[in-house]
Amino acid sequence: MNKITSFFLLVFLSASCTPPNYDEIPLAPVKIDGKWGFIDKNGNIAINPQFEGAADFKEGLAVIVLDWKWGFIDKNGKIAINPRFEEAWPFKEGLAPIKLGGKWGFIDKNGKIAINPQFEEALWFKDGLAPIKLGSKWGYIDKNGKIAINPQFEWAWDFKEGLAPIKLGGKYGFIDKNGKIAINPQFESAGVFHEGLARIKLGGKWGYIDKNGKIAINPQFEDAWQFQEGLASIKLEWDGKWGFIDKNGNIIINPQFEEAWWFEEGLARIQLDGKWGYIDKNGNIAINPQFEDADDFQEGRARISLDGKWGYIDKNGKIVAKPQFDYAWDFQEGLAMIRLGDKWGYIDKSGKVVIEPQFEKARDFN
């Protein structure tokens, strides 16, 4: 064997023996023999099952539970933050909520305490602010742990489209990021803003307001969902039917359905005569109601149930994975979790089983 051939053989063998770097590879938590680990999309064990609990990777780190303490690992399975917390949630905007000594605080990605545990409850950061509960009141902190909006609310949520819903004096309103009351607490209930409008309940009826707090669509509905893809599902009478309105409050699709959800990928799931199907934005039946259960479209596929088994359809209503599974979940990163008997595996979008059902539990790829 000449020197050049030997050199290239050495390079090939070195490369083939190098363990994969999972930093940019989607991984999914799975449970084997009572322990959680992670697999790649080929079904190979990427991180050995060794944890009592594990969550999806977020911002490069995943929450794990080891010896009943919470910590974080990186995508190579290396302990990035030692398990020492009573509870922990995934990272968002560079910080993660953790519980220590019965109180919630935040850590950075080095595991350093960024904001001392001092809160009764804490949610994730969004747009630089996080809702926290101090005593019995909710307020907001910035990423330095400084109180940005004084704890004064009976309830608070995160910001969406620049405003956050809060509860004060038993009524719901909205604040801006400076903590100023943007829309006076006056509603019996309220949701977050979606596409410029928020649903609110007033006088026992649901309607919608704009970001100035002006009534955009009069409260008149027995029930209503958020706007998505320009339309919102509404119910006119308590024992009546569901239809859809536009942002001017015009009835676009007449109330005729027993149930109706929001639009995803151009289609909305509806129930008619006890069966689930899908409509388009003109209200036309796109996929005939025929299923015992159904979910929204994700990545061009929707899970449906027929004769007690779960399968998948495409947006033309064609069965791409025949109903054969005892349970199924939405597609993410091109794969979907399915359960056969008491074991979980994964299929691809053609319906082919690509990772055999073998896991006690499983979660999405991230």
Image (cartoon, helix red, strand yellow):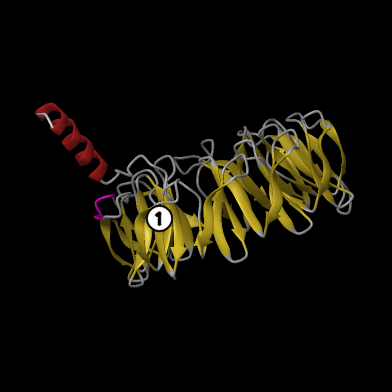
Q: Is residue 1 visible?
A: yes
Instruction: Tell me the kind of residue under disc 1.
Output: Phe
The quadrant in which the N terminus is found is top left
Q: Position of residue 62 (x, y in %)?
A: 37, 53
At a point 41% along the width and 45% down the height, the residue shown is: 129
Q: Position of residue 108 (x, y in %)?
A: 29, 50
Instruction: Please give the count of numbered marks on the rendered protein.
Output: 1
Position of residue 306 relative to residue 297, above or below, is below
Element at label 1: strand
Quarter-wise, where is residue 111 in the image? bottom left
Q: Is residue 281 left or right of residue 303?
A: right
Classify mark 1: residues with Cα within 10 Å, few (<14), some (14-19) or many (20+).
many
Q: Is residue 200 left or right of residue 243?
A: left
At a point 11% along the width and 29% down the height, the residue shown is: 2
Residue at mark 1 = 38
Q: Nearer the viewer, residue 289 or 196?
A: 289
Quarter-wise, where is residue 254 in the image? top right
At a point 44% along the width and 70% down the height, the residue shown is: 33
Q: Position of residue 93 (x, y in %)?
A: 37, 43
- In magenta, the rendered stretch is 109-114
> What secondary structure prevails in the magenta region?
loop
Q: Position of residue 267 (x, y in %)?
A: 72, 35
Q: Nearer the viewer, residue 58 or 349?
A: 349
